[in-house]
Image: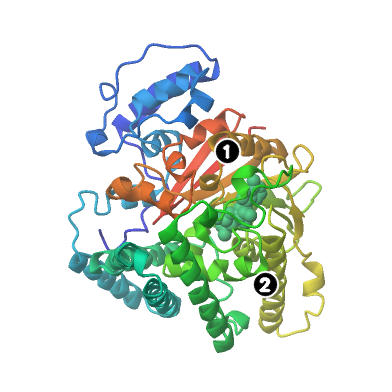
Amino acid sequence: MTANSFSTPLFSIKSDQEQQLQQVMQDIEKDFLSDVPIEKEPRGSSVPNSSAENYIIDEPREQDSIINETDTTLQDINEQFASPAMYENTKFEYDETVQFWQDLNRDGSMEASDMIQEIVNVANRFVGKGGDALNYWLRHNARTGYFLTNASLGTIGSALHERLVNNNNEDNRGDEEGKAKGFIETLAQPKVVSRLLMDTALSYEQDYQRIADGKFKLPYDMYTSNRQNSPFFFARQTARFVNEAVGTVSRRNRGTDEDKRTWISGIKSDLYPDYYQNAFHYQTDGWMSQESANVYETSTESLFLGRQDAMQRTALVPLVKYSKEYSQSNKDGAKRPLRVLEVACGTGRFLTFARDNLPLDTEFTAVDLSPFYLDKARDNDKNWRSIRKKSDKANSRGSSADVLTTIKPVRAVQAKAEDLPFENEEFDAVVCMYLYHEVPRDIRAKIASEMARVTRPGGRVIFTDSIQLGDRPDHDATMGNFEKMNEPHYRDYISDYLPVHFEKVGMECLTKTVCSGTKTLAFRKPE
Ligand SMILES: C[S@@+](CC[C@H](N)C(=O)[O-])C[C@H]1O[C@@H](n2cnc3c(N)ncnc32)[C@H](O)[C@@H]1O
């Protein structure tokens, strides 16, 4: 790790070995797309990567047959590559972050003290830069402090609750208390906490570097006085989160079928597929209540100690870059505003950062299956528009009474990602964040096909989701455990070769970025 970890040139030049490997892959792909079975060397013999053995190789699962049965070339890819990350790194231009997170603690030798030292190094670098950098660091540390407090209160609340319940139920006492203790002790280990804090500090550094490089702006909610920064808001969100954490941990400890159900489970519906009728993360009501939507951002940020926004903002890099190219190409021709679609927008938090960084006349559409999350997304959009109006007014020192009216509200549409109710080529850019790990593999393929269909030629699909096997080798052994948080498709997701879904529907692979537990892949639809 060096002082300029995230400030090396944007895309690294590939080594000779990697270029050779890319050539091999291009050959495979030619065959793959033409569906001609080809003979390949066994795994390892033609893959110039000495660390291949370090990767966990999943046993084939039932879901794999969805693609594999007729698709001999996917088998070839499986034989060539020990992990989706290895494969991806031959398909995309990847920036320095990909190598950085791959190498971080690769051999697992970092102790808690090394991680704390790393945090101190990051702090020193921020302090050394001063100005906006220091401001960013201080404010984001306050943010992490708040979410760490939430996480601690949630953990303590859950432990007390489990004890109370078990005191009333002597039969289960040893068993349930053991489970609760095990879960809480895991979270409270110095090494686990230090690792989470180190990841958070490094994510902030990476996020800030992008801002300093002019890739996107400082977060709009960093300076302004808005509802998110009021003590009342904090107190209410903490109360909501602790209440939710107690329920979540209880359900996780029991893990019964009933705990995995929501109030829509078991209904026959064209709108809500079976896989959707699940209480993901054991959260109350799954995606289907106002309370779930109200606590979601606080829950995820408490889990990630405040770095979720920074991880999501990795998607801004290709989106803002593309928007600039779009304005450029439109300069002399007939202009129409950029059209952006976000698929599975959730509470719309990312959408507000995207809107803040794109031209104000950009037309935004947001899709989600949950009417409750869509409602929250509209509320977040309204809040952003009012903050933006205030800051524009302050900056222009004049009247901007009509700024709000010139920024159209987001168009919120309840629909399935795998069946989008839009015309072919209706959007210039389509963003999809943290959806793929929650859906079965065949649905992932359908969503890729739908996103490609509604994107205009020359446009972009920007994909952001959890890292997969090989993205951070030190996580491989434990990554699949997230499945235990009632994430039934996660284990399959981490071994799914994602570019395959997109290339099959004609998209080209462009760029890859990693930030802590998240990666962003950008695809282009050829003209
Ligand atoms: C993990 S959340 C991510 C939300 C948001 N993109 C974010 O990054 O915060 C998953 C979201 O996907 C939505 N969702 C799940 N399956 C969907 C589908 N098939 N079509 C549309 N939305 C879906 C859920 O309602 C939920 O809001």
Q: Could one spot residue 359 in this view of the protein?
A: no
Q: Residue furthest bottom?
A: 231
Instruction: Name the residue carrying label 2.
Output: 384
Quarter occupied by the C terminus: top right
Q: Which residue lies furthest to the front in this view?
A: 171
Mark 2 or mark 1: name the one nearer the start of the chain.
2
Percent position of residue 316, x then y: 55, 56
Instruction: Name the residue carrying label 1.
Output: 444
Please, what is the three-letter code of the amino acid marked with disc 1? Arg
- Secondary structure under tag 1 reads helix
Nearest the eye: 30 or 449:
449
- Secondary structure under tag 2 reads helix
Q: Residues within 10 Å of mark 2 (few under 14, many from 20)?
A: many
| Residue 316 image label | none
Nearest the eye: 476 or 499:
476
Please, what is the three-letter code of the amino acid marked with disc 2? Trp
Percent position of residue 186, x then y: 29, 63
Q: Which of marks 2 and 1 is in front?
A: 1
State the residue at coordinates (35%, 31%).
59
Relative placement, left or right, of 17 versus 300 is left
Nearest the eye: 122 or 377:
377
Quarter occupied by the N terminus: bottom left
Percent position of residue 312, x then y: 51, 59
Is disc 2's CB within 8 Å of ligand 1? no
What is the CA distance from the residue labelled 2 to the residue labelled 1? 31 Å
State the residue at coordinates (49%, 37%).
498
As drawn, 23 above or below 363: above
Nearest the eye: 280 or 309:
280
Percent position of residue 350, x then y: 59, 61
Is disc 1's CB within 8 Å of ligand 1? no
State the residue at coordinates (60%, 49%).
432
Q: How crowded is mark 1: few (under 14 residues within 10 Å), some or many (20 or more)?
A: many
